[in-house]
Image (spheres, rainbow, N blue to C red):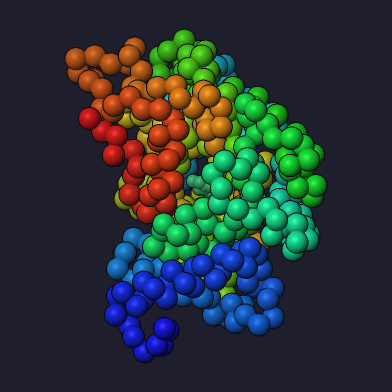
Amino acid sequence: MVTGMDSSPAATHFHRRAELQAFDDTKAGVKGLLSDPSSTATTAIPRIFHLPDDDPIDAVPTSLPAGGTLHVPVIDLGAGDADAVAEQVGRAAREWGFFQLVGHGVPAEVMEAMISGVRRFHEDETAESKAALYSRDPMRKVKWNCNFDLFQSRTANWRDTLFCWMAPEPPMPEEIPSTCREIMMLYSEHMTMLGGTLFELLSRALGLNPTYLKDMECCRGHYLLSHYYPECPQPDLTLGTSRHSDSGFLTILLQDQLGGLQVMHDNQWVDVQPIPGAFVINVADLLQLISNDEFISVEHRVLASNRGPRISVACFFTMFFSPLSTIMYGPIEELLSEDNPPLYRKIMIKDYISHYYSKGLSGKSALADFKL
Ligand code: OGA
Ligand code: NI
């Protein structure tokens, strides 16, 4: 059936689908592609990874020149009292949707051990054990794959990802790959603690009782996405992660020192310069929704690079497996007034997540679909 000469849109679509399927069937991800001696991916990336050429924002990976004046705000959790820190958190959440956090109390050794654990999973786990864990089943708490939206998005990203739903009901320890099991569980405990602190600051910044967001169960659940971005021979043709906003309430990101993460600010891409020992914190869609647009969930992306692998771990505070995912969330009543009417309808987290997943990383906000 494959004619090789037929370049009609339908044929192109057919080839793409078949190529995606063949790639997914390898259950080896981008990393596997690069270590397969019969593949040419070490010099030319397969076309399923090519950016569409009709999307100027993604097709031109521009950033500010080095020495550019814009920087994501940096907040020191250890400097000043809770009100002063909450003030800074509030300003960053309103103006940028992003900030970097230092003085947070998570030991540097834990952060380094987490990066090493993720590297061990992606590099040292046997091919058989990785193939057994490769899955797109939404009900599996622990799995890995290459692009959760491989079959939904227009372009595949140069990235492999391990998913672990850790709270409120953690997986059985033996479900977590042995290469990173212990550190995954320890790191998750630190995320629960730091998440509690951050939601308290965010509550204060909204002028609410400090336990307000915690009482709403915003930080009861989290999952960890452990990303591995291999070096890419043609970094201008693809992305590590397409532009998107995050689906949960809040994200705590640990990144190594290679760089590549960019956020949209004032209509331009701004580099999030790695700072040793810092976390990158960002407001996600559900927090924008419950804050009725006071805090903003901002688009970000990761460039591909010929230096790699780059490793990052995103902790998403949200709910999915738990019965708590059926709680309804809408704009917080205390924030509303005649001048500030609700902008969104009430939704269940599980419906939001399904909607977000069905769209994939398309660069179009899933939140907009819930506007009143
Ligand atoms: C994400 C994300 C950024 C990174 O997982 O949603 O934006 O640096 N990750 O990997
Ligand atoms: Ni993200």
Q: Quadrant of the N terminus?
A: bottom left
Q: Quadrant of the C terminus?
A: top left
Q: Position of residue 162 (x, y in %)?
A: 64, 50
Q: Residue 220: which quarter of the image?
A: top right
Between 282 and 325, the residue placed more toward the observer is 325
Between 273 and 26, the residue placed more toward the observer is 26
Q: Residue 92: which quarter of the image?
A: top left
**In screen coordinates, is 247 left or right of 112?**
left
Tell me if I can see residue 106 in this picture.
Answer: yes
Q: Position of residue 337 (x, y in %)?
A: 24, 14
Q: Position of residue 332 (x, y in %)?
A: 36, 18
Q: Image point 48% across, 17% down: which residue?
A: 216
Q: In the figure, 96 relative to 206: above or below?
A: below
Q: Image point 59% across, 77% down: which residue?
A: 41
Looking at the image, the residue that sits furthest to the left is 338
Q: Residue 145: which quarter of the image?
A: bottom right
Tell me if I can see residue 279 in this picture.
Answer: no
Q: Image point 71% across, 50% down: which residue?
A: 118
Q: In the figure, 49 relative to 322: above or below?
A: below
Q: Image point 51% across, 53% down: which residue?
A: 148
Q: In the figure, 297 relative to 86: above or below?
A: below
Between 142 and 372, the residue placed more toward the observer is 142
**In screen coordinates, is 207 left or right of 106?**
left
Give the number of callouts.
0
